[in-house]
Amino acid sequence: MIKKSLLTAVALVAGLGLVASPSAYGAQSPLPAAPAAQAAPQLVCTVNDNGVNFRGGPGTDYAVLGTVNRGQNINARGRQGNWLMGDLWGGPTGVWIHVAYLDC
């Protein structure tokens, strides 16, 4: 019973990354922890013209929500055809801009 309790305690502490190896306690090493998930590199694009419309969807049939100027950055989150969807730095999120007006 004591060995089982010790193994459980060691496994809990090891799961928190506080103990390097439970083998010092006579227990078998637990399975190695999965590596930390790494965020996918984010694609940042820059608007290459002034007065560029950003829209609520991927096409000219969607409402113009506003305009941006040369140098504005956008974190790309998706693409449909020739339209990129993303989040404007310091502005609205989930907006669409035609790729002709972006340098990625």
Image (cartoon, rainbow, N blue to C red):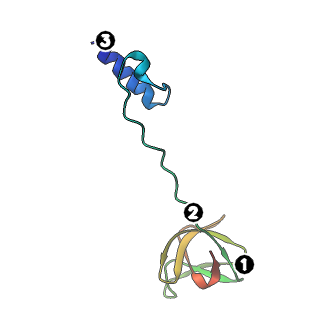
Disc nearer the start of the sequence (1/2): 2
Taking depth in this image into account, of 95 and 32 the one nearest to the observer is 32
The span from disc 1 to disc 3 (Cα, nearest Å) is 68 Å
Q: Give the side of residue 22 with respect to residue 48, left or right.
A: left
Callout 1 amino acid: Arg
Taking depth in this image into account, of 50 and 29 the one nearest to the observer is 29
Mark 1 nearby-residue class (10 Å; few <14, some 14–19, many ≥20): some
SS class, disc 3 = helix
Q: Residue furthest bottom?
A: 60
SS class, disc 2 = loop
Mark nearer the viewer, 1 or 3: 3
Marker disc for residue 2: 3
Disc nearer the start of the sequence (2/3): 3
Callout 2 amino acid: Gln
Quadrant of the snapshot with the C terminus: bottom right
Q: Which residue is mark 2?
A: 42
The residue shown at (52%, 81%) is 83
Mark 2 nearby-residue class (10 Å; few <14, some 14–19, many ≥20): few
Marker disc for residue 70: 1
SS class, disc 1 = loop
Q: Give the answer, above or below, for where 41 lies relative to 94.
A: above
